[in-house]
Image (cartoon, grey):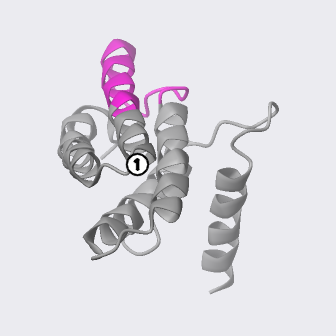
Amino acid sequence: MKTWLLGLAAAGLVLTNLGAADDKVPSVDEIMKAVNKKKGGLHSDVADLLKAGSVDWTTVQDKTKKYSAMADFLGKNDPPQGDKKSWEKLTKAYAAEAKALYDAAGKKDKSGCSSAMSKLQKSCMGCHKVHRPS
């Protein structure tokens, strides 16, 4: 339980300090946990918020800003496995789609957010097949 709470606190610290100039680039593992955790991960949180009858755009905008920043950090890491050029191409596309999600949230465009979320979800396995260690 302590380890889980410490990990959650560390992820929160990474996410709250994204604007600082001396930020340490989070590891691929830290990014994946912050974005993709089943409960409390940015992707699932945003998806749940968008399903609400009345969308809390302030929270969606905050979470998509963090999502976009984490996606951008991903490409600043070396690939855990596989070719660096492939990693650069895939992480750049992922970051661009996360930015599109953030931009759609800024416009309170539910359809645009949903489209970006779908594209982000579909991009996972393509990258994992090539770059995720066994």
Q: Residues within 10 Å of mark 1 (few under 14, many from 20)?
A: many
Instruction: Pinpoint residue 118: horizontal percent, then vertical percent.
Output: 19, 49
Residue 47: where, in percent of width, then height?
A: 31, 64
Residue drawn at point x = 43 percent, y = 34 percent = 80
Residue carrying label 1: 105
The image quarter in which residue 23 lies: top right
Q: Mark yes or no: residue 37 visible.
A: no
> Magenta part of the protein: which range?
75-96
| Magenta stretch: includes residue 91 | yes
Numbered disc 1: secondary structure: helix
Residue 41 pos. (x, y %): 45, 65
Residue occupying image coordinates x 22% and y 39% = 123
Tell me where residue 115 sits by quadrant: top left
Query: From the viewer's perspective, is residue 85 above or below residue 11?
Result: above
Q: Nearer the viewer, residue 105 or 96?
A: 105
Q: State the residue in front, 47 or 134.
A: 47
